[in-house]
Amino acid sequence: MRTAFLLGAVAALVAGAVALCQTPPRLAFEVTSAKALSPAMVQSRAFEPWKIDKAYARFSRATLLALICHAYRVKASQVSGPDWMNIRFFEVVGKLPAGASTDTVPEMLQSLIEDRFHLKAHRESKEMPVYALVLGKGGSKLTPARDDFTWTPGTSLSPCTLETYAELLSEGANRPVIDRTGLQGPYMLPTGAMSQARMARLGPALARDAAAQGAEAMAATLLAMAGEGDLSPALIGGLKLEPRREMFPMLVIDRVEATPTPN
């Protein structure tokens, strides 16, 4: 009896160890569609919010960088990869398996990107140059966001947290921008200036990509919109950027293809 008990205990331990060593099943959409959008298609289509429900996940007019950020739960400033990931647009749709939770869509999107764009990446933390978004000597002069704010065409200020604001500024900088103000809550911040900062960095690359695809007029317009890379117009309310070196968690793209495999 004692021997049988011991054998049973050993078998249970072995089974438990095997279960712990097994790789969890890979989450994936049942059916996927991924296609590149030409510059003309991007210009002609109105912006559509991403839609995720229990049946489908639809990512309209999405850059691969935005898809990667959603899939791997990182910010754009944490992704190290080719610039084209932030200037070429795609339309991606995935059909969720029956009974799947929408909380698992990022993991399914990871599988889609790895299968269709052949992405290979790894995570690492490294010391690197960053900009710290801090308050100047005079302190904050920011205006808190109003609860009853309604956006209308021509509005130059929109509610935004400083963490999100720093991330948007990163798109126009040559290094990540990190919020170090210590301020909480949304404030009224300049959306137009943020777009200008983003174009200062990406405008030339966008223009080259448009020209390569035959959209010469669009290329000229994009090049005219590109500035000198100065982020100072986007800084208001006593904010300033302070160059530093900090440890920063990164998702490093080792390989990725610009054209997804055919549907």
Image (cartoon, rainbow, N blue to C red):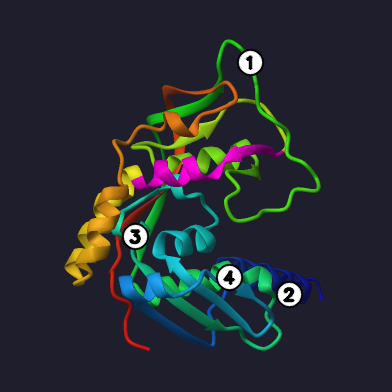
Residue at point 67%, 68% (across, down): 103
Give how far apart the Cα atoms at labels 3 and 2 are.
Answer: 60 Å
Q: Residues within 10 Å of mark 4 (few under 14, many from 20)?
A: few
Q: Earlier in the sequence, mark 1 or mark 4?
A: 4
Give how far apart the Cα atoms at labels 1 and 4 are.
Answer: 37 Å
Residue pointed to by mark 4:
50
Can you tell which of label 1 and label 2 is closer to the viewer?
1
Q: Residues within 10 Å of mark 1 (few under 14, many from 20)?
A: few
Along the line of sight, which residue is nearer the eye, 248 or 10? 248
Residue at point 55%, 77% (across, down): 58
Disc 1 and disc 3 in contact, CB within 8 angstroms? no
Along the line of sight, which residue is nearer the eye, 227 or 98? 227
Disc 1 and disc 2 in contact, CB within 8 angstroms? no
Place of residue 253 in the rendered image (x, y in percent of width and height, measured from the top left): 34, 56
Give how far apart the Cα atoms at labels 4 and 3 are.
Answer: 18 Å
Three-letter amino acid code of the residue under disc 4 = Trp
Q: Earlier in the sequence, mark 4 or mark 3?
A: 4
Three-letter amino acid code of the residue under disc 1 = Gly
Can you tell which of label 3 and label 2 is closer to the viewer?
3
For residue 43, above or below residue 74: below
Displayed quadrant of residue 114: bottom left
Q: Secondary structure at mark 2?
A: helix
Residue 24 left/right relative to 116: right
Q: Was residue 191 drawn as part of the magenta stretch in this picture? A: yes
Residue pointed to by mark 2:
8
Q: Was residue 216 drawn as part of the magenta stretch in this picture? A: no
Residue pointed to by mark 3:
87
